[in-house]
Image (cartoon, coloured by chain):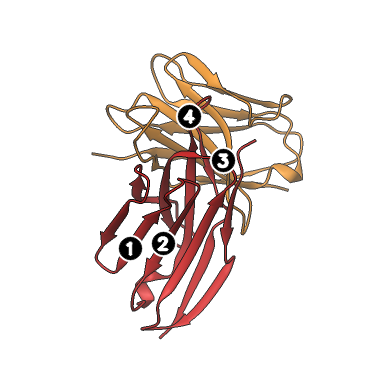
Chain colours: A red, B orange
Amino acid sequence: GQQVMQIPQYQHVQEGEDFTTYCNSSTTLSNIQWYKQRPGGHPVFLIQLVKSGEVKKQKRLTFQFGEAKKNSSLHITATQTTDVGTYFCAAMNSGGSNYKLTFGKGTLLTVNP
Amino acid sequence: NAGVMQNPRHLVRRRGQEARLRCSPMKGHSHVYWYRQLPEEGLKFMVYLQKENIIDESGMPKERFSAEFPKEGPSILRIQQVVRGDSAAYFCASSPSSTNYGYTFGSGTRLTVV
C-alpha cells in the first residue's frame, strides 16, 4: 500500500534556530497535507499542497511540494517554544482510493528556550 | 461551530469487555474517518464512512472491530472483547468532501485495556 517516509524522526533545536522536516513517497501524489500535533493533543490541519512545485508560506512556516509530486518539505524559520509538537505529512494518492490520507510517522520537534 | 466531538476522552476497559467510541462530525461534514495512533507512531487509517455507508474498511481488523455511521446520531467505532494490544488513541476526523479538503480531527479517545 501507499507509504510515506518522513525524516527526521526527532529534532531538537535551540530557540531561534531553523527546522526542516522532509516527506517522501515512491508514487506520485494527488496532494499532500501537513498537520501539527501538540503533545497530548490531536492533529491540526496546517495546509494542503496540490500543484507540482508549489510553495506556500504561513508566517514563519514554508511548505514545498516537489516538481514530481513525490516529496514535500516543511521549513520553520527562527523556531519558538510554541512550535513544539509533532509535524506529520499526509499524502493522498493519485487514482484509486484517492480519498484516503496516509500519514508519515511524523517529526517530533522540541525547542530549548 | 463545535468542531468534531469525540467521547469519551478516556476509556478504561478490562480485557474481554467491549469499547464503544463515539464521533460527531462537524456540521456540514458528511465524511468520517477513524484513525488509530500508538505512542510515538503516526496515524493508521482504519475506516472511512459516509452516512449509512462504509466506503473503505481496509485498515480495520476483520475480527472484533466494527464501525457505523447511522442516518441519525454519531459514528460509532466498536471494539469487542478488547485485548491489551487495542490500547491506543483513536481519532475521528471529518471533511465536507472526500478530496482536496483537510481533515478536522476530534480530540480523540484514549483507550486503555487493563
**What label sits on residue A62 in the rendered view?**
1
- Which residue in the structure is indicated by mark 3? A27
The numbered mark, 4 or 2, whose residue comes first in the sequence reads 2
Image quadrant in which the C terminus of chain A is located: bottom left
The amino acid beneath tag 2 is Leu
Q: Is residue B114 above or below residue A2?
A: below
The structure residue drawn at horizontal position 38% and vertical position 77%, both measured from the top left corner, is A81
- Identify the element where label 1 is drawn: strand
Comparing labels 4 and 3, the label whose residue is closer to the camera: 3
Q: Dot 4, how many residues are within 10 Å of its Cα: few (below 14), some (14-19), or many (20+)?
A: some
Q: Dot 3, how many residues are within 10 Å of its Cα: few (below 14), some (14-19), or many (20+)?
A: some
**Residue B50, position as x, y percentages in the image:** 43, 20
Residue A14 location, quadrant: bottom left
Labelled pair 1, 2 in contact (Cβ < 8 Å) = yes
The amino acid beneath tag 4 is Asn
- Which residue in the structure is indicated by mark 2? A74
Q: Are marks 2 and 3 on the same chain?
A: yes
Label 1, label 4: how far apart the Cα atoms are: 25 Å
Labelled pair 2, 3 in contact (Cβ < 8 Å) = no
- Identify the element where label 3 is drawn: loop
Label 3, label 1: how far apart the Cα atoms are: 23 Å
The numbered mark, 1 or 2, whose residue comes first in the sequence reads 1
